[in-house]
Amino acid sequence: MEKLKADVAVIGAGITGCSIARELSKYKIKTIVIEKDADAGWGTTKANSGLIHPGYAGTEGTLKLKICNAGSKLFLKNAEELEIAVQNNGSMVNAFNEIQIKELELNLKQGQKYGVPGLEIIYNNNGALKKLEPNISNNVKACLFCKVHYRTSPYEAAIAIFENAKSNGVDFVFSSKVVNIHYDNVTKKFFIETLSTSGNLNENFGLKSIIEADYIVNAAGIFADEISKMSGDGSYSIKAYKGQYFLLDTETKGFVKRPNLRISDPENIKSKGMVVIPALSGNLLLGSTYEHTDKYDVNTVSEVLEDVKLKLNSMFEKIPFKKTITTFSGLRAVSDSHDFILGPSKANERFIDAAGIESPGLTCTFLIAEMTADFLNQKGVKLNKNPSYKPYRKKALKLDKENFLSNNSYISEDHDYGEIICRCEKVTKAEVIEAINNGATTIDGIKFRTRAGMGRCQGGYCTLKVMKILSEELGIPFNEITKSGGNSYIAGKKMA
């Protein structure tokens, strides 16, 4: 049985866990991150709208609202250090009747209270909203216009943070599910028992490991309450709420100029306000629902998606849903307090919760990390600075998709930049190899780092090519390459 030791064990490698790990790497702290999936950012992180909220919306009195504006500013600072792409075109929250306009007025006042700049209510008089969004429906009576509202790619952000944390000495243990936690009152040590969920290397399904740690940070997303119970604390619960989305082809670029949010319908529990967002990739992202479900349900349902269409078609005219290239869903980790749960556990002060991290969790991720480090410090972890810490990370080189002549210098230096693996997204063999060198071990690992498989054909052209490179670079038989770890084999475990 393998045994590892750490000062701090972080459970969960979503954007919250990765941010906490990076924050701890600033200090002389031995940190291990334990993740049940095969890569970073594959839970709640990868399937959300990517909005960096400015802090005008939320329930008064919640920690979520209190720290949102400060969190957004800190996100932008760290995004610059890590070369995480962000974009600001403002946003519009759209109302359809007088009751909803009253809600816009409340959000305006709340935003002004928390220092959100550039907020104003614009009424649909003399085509004012059409000037902002030419395709907006006349059903929309007014909007709360926010001049400063950034957006990003959440999974790309998580990968950037993961890469920087790893380069600063954090160890990541992937494909390892935490199944038991024991605390020794004499030695003041946690003993975390994990079970391998990977079968790629040496038939490792079910292989047990023990990780010894002085402290635990619980950043396990929708499973945070289950991890908390293992430590002896059952004081809160986490429910999974599903959101279903459409992703439209890049041909739809320009249909909207900025993120547009539809005020939620109080009578419809399946709606949490829907969005039409121009993604940084050029795609159009539309959704989502708000459905209480189990923690493993990421299915999409045609009847529910039709309801999304109906509601968004009332906000915009002639949305090109025929250009849909995929639908998907993600799960939100909603605590019973409907707020972040941050701080030492009621059962053990060496166990720190970073739970219930739903929206605006992405926005607040770096601030949550700083707060977590402070909690650890209060409970005895010494924050002695790591002199070799490097805050910067260079993003992977990508081809210029529009001006191909500018790529000649890259190709002359490395011929692999001249071999296109993914036609839709113009991803080269060199980019795939770099992604593997940076930690990708699966098809999805390549996809989220390079966008190979995210285009119009959804991997129809490039999947086998990516598998071949993975096999060659990792020294794994072709038939053992998986989509996302575990049993997700593409070619089958045994070749005919």
Image (tube, rainbow, N blue to C red):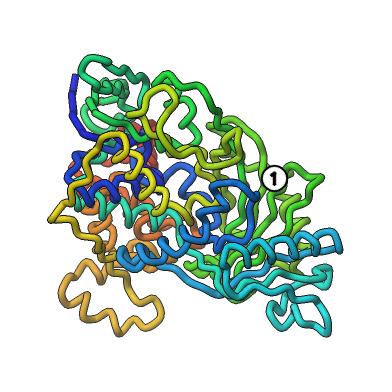
Q: Quadrant of the N terminus?
A: top left
x then y, percent, for residue 13: 36, 42
270 or 437, which is in the foreground? Answer: 270
Q: Quadrant of the C terminus?
A: top left
Relative to 408, residue 307 above or below: above
Could you tell me which residue is drawn at 43 percent across and 56 percent down? 453
Please state if 237 lies on the left or on the right of 316 as rendered. Answer: left
Relative to 27, residue 56 above or below: below
492 or 175, which is in the foreground? Answer: 175
254 or 493, which is in the foreground? Answer: 254
Could you tell me which residue is drawn at 37 percent across and 38 percent down? 12
x then y, percent, for residue 310: 78, 56
x then y, percent, for residue 470: 26, 48
Q: What secondary structure is marked by label 1?
A: helix
Relative to 364, residue 12 above or below: above
Please state if 327 lies on the left or on the right of 120 as rendered. Answer: left
User: According to the image, label 1 marks what residue?
Assistant: 302
Please state if 95 lies on the left or on the right of 249 as rendered. Answer: right
Dot 1 alpha-carbon crowd within 10 angstroms: few under 14, some 14 to 19, many 20 or more: few
x then y, percent, for residue 492: 36, 34
Could you tell me which residue is drawn at 38 percent across and 52 percent down? 158
Could you tell me which residue is drawn at 66 percent across and 61 percent down? 110
- In this view, the residue farthest toward the left is 387
Q: Quadrant of residue 205?
A: top left
Residue 479 visible within the image: no
Q: Quadrant of residue 428?
A: bottom left
- In this view, the residue farthest toward the front is 378
How many marks can you see? 1
Residue 76 visible within the image: yes
